[in-house]
């Protein structure tokens, strides 16, 4: 059994596309993380419903924006909205190994096999396999798997990579900007590059 440490933290974190977009815009305007935190604390720049939620959004947006690095932060504003959402998802994949493995082992495989839909069973099968092969995941409670499955679905919906259709979700590939692919290669994130190329190849 693998003892790789996975996180279930996405159960409480949303996609927060517009907040991350706003964070990147502020970085590009020359603001520092400290200054953005001050704006969040003092004037609720992200429009959070509570102080705790404002702190959560700031921390997530900071991590996701900064993991992309300066090159992508500058490119981000030149991309269309579809690609900005894909890059937002990529920032999460860079920080969350389990979601990345879902994209590699489930979403990508579906596309490669021409099976253009996801069901609840696909999420359950993925977590069942991880439970069987990983010590950390094996200790999680059933409600954690259910909440993670819902979170993954919401991330894919908000990234534009699936759309709801009754009891199944239809996979909706996107044409990914070649500059995004080149950037992924330049930072040596080949596994994410592979997912991105598959998504584009299916478009």
Image (cartoon, rainbow, N blue to C red):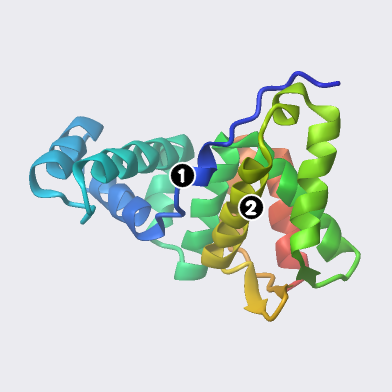
Compare marks 2 and 1 and give the one earlier in the sequence.
1
* Residue 23 in the image, given as x and y percentages of width and height: 29, 48
Residue at (75% x, 29% y) in the render: 138
Q: Answer yes or no: is residue 67 visible.
A: yes
Residue at (66% x, 36% y) in the render: 141
Give the quarter of the image for residue 59: top left
Residue at the extreme left: 42
* Residue 24 in the image, given as x and y percentages of width and height: 33, 48
Along the viewing direction, whichever of 29 and 202 lies nearer the viewer: 202
| Helix, strand or loop status at disc 2 | helix
Report how far apart the C-alphas of labels 2 and 1 lie in the structure.
29 Å
* Residue 32 in the image, given as x and y percentages of width and height: 22, 34
Which residue, given by chain and number where applicable, does mark 1 sit on? Answer: 12
Figure quadrant of the N terminus? top right
Which residue, given by chain and number where applicable, does mark 2 sit on? Answer: 181
* Other residues around mark 1 within 10 Å, as few (<14) / some (14–19) / many (≥20): few
| Helix, strand or loop status at disc 1 | helix
Q: Answer yes or no: is residue 99 visible.
A: no
Give the quarter of the image for residue 109: bottom right
Where is 183 relative to 112, above or below? above
* Residue 182 in the image, given as x and y percentages of width and height: 62, 49
């Amino acid at each position: 059994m693998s003892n790789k440490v996975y996180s279930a933290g996405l159960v409480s974190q949303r996609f927060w596309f517009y907040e991350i977009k706003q964070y990147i815009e502020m970085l590009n305007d020359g603001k520092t993380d400290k200054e953005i935190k001050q704006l969040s604390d003092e004037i609720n720049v992200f429009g959070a419903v509570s102080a705790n939620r404002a702190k959560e959004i700031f921390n997530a947006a900071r991590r996701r924006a900064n993991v992309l690095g300066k090159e992508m932060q500058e490119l981000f504003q030149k991309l269309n909205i579809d690609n900005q959402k894909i890059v937002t998802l990529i920032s999460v994949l860079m920080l969350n190994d389990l979601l990345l493995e879902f994209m590699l082992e489930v979403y990508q495989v579906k596309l490669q096999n021409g099976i253009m839909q996801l069901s609840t069973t696909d999420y359950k099968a993925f977590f069942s396999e991880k439970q069987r092969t990983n010590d950390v995941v094996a200790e999680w409670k059933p409600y954690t798997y259910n909440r993670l499955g819902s979170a993954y679905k919401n991330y894919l919906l908000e990234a534009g990579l699936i759309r709801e259709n009754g009891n199944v979700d239809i996979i909706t590939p996107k044409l990914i900007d070649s500059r995004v692919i080149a950037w992924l290669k330049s930072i040596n994130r080949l596994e994410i590059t592979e997912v991105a190329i598959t998504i584009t190849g299916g478009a």
